[in-house]
Image (cartoon, rainbow, N blue to C red):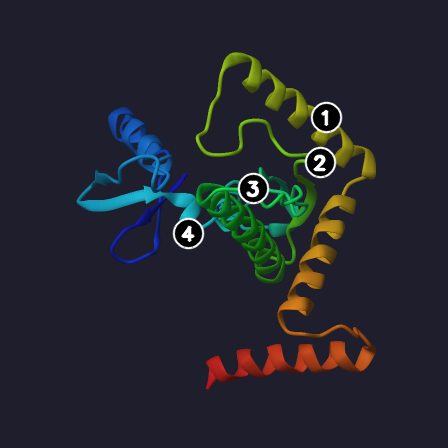
Amino acid sequence: MLSCDCNTGLYHRYEEDLTLEEFQEAIITSASVPMLFPWQNLKGAQLFDGGVCKMTDISGAILRCRGLVDNDDSKIHVTIVYISRKELEPWTGKETSLDALNRYQKIENFRKCFRELTSAYDYYHNVNYDYVIAPTKPLPGNKFPFTFGEDRLLEMINQGISDAKAAIDLGKGASIRNFLEMAQKQEQEDHDIFDMSVETIQTIKAGKEKRMNLLLE
């Protein structure tokens, strides 16, 4: 569970060593979405929603698992559940500024999901990435202001079950590969690269190696 530090922009991670009262406060802090809920004080820090820093704490989960498998990454299996989706609903031209903010968050959140998964895949490449479960259609109640009545919650739960079954039916690793392919295409678009020839791939690989070698100097 994460929260984001208002002063540093870095995340705070909370685990099982908290007292019950601290754990309850950490939950409130982690769910304090900016503009909707006030920031919180916890252990001398000023904090709000951890999703500002990370959409999914993949590395935190892997590090916790390492303590259970004697640091053998090949024994770790990861399944990731997202609430963001790449596909966007049509823009009608009648939207308000609040709708524009909501659209901005959707775009940024999914780009963040791309970055986090590809980065984790690079840094923890011996881990088994089994499934990515993401909405196949817009989640009900995902626009401001958030509304979560019992019927809507059940609808979201049922959609989650359906999306999970779809990912499992594709086979282990297939949904991860699909997601990584989407992430790669997004990265190509970001850098105006539209021809993924062998030469282009080698150039990208050389660039990444050069960056890592620079850190070793």
Q: Earlier in the sequence, mark 4 or mark 2?
A: 4
Q: Are marks 2 and 1 in contact (CB under 8 Å)?
A: yes
The reply to whether callout 4 and callout 2 are in contact (CB within 8 Å) is: no
Q: Amino acid at mark 1?
A: Ser
State the separation of the CA atoms marked 4 and 3.
31 Å
Q: Please tell me which residue is depicted at 68% across the width and 45% down the height of the picture.
A: 87
Quickly name the residue at label 2.
136
Considering depth in this image, is 136 or 58 the residue closer to the camera? 136
Residue linked to disc 4: 53
**Marks 1/3: CA–CA distance:** 32 Å
> Which residue shows up at 53% across the image and 32% down it?
142
Identify residue type, mark 2.
Answer: Thr
SS at badge 3: loop
- Say which label, 3 or 2, has the lower sequence index: 3
State which mark lies toward you, 3 or 2: 3
Task: Tell whether 166 sits left or right of 208.
Answer: right
The residue to which callout 3 is attached is: 94
**Residue 159 vs residue 53: left or right?**
right
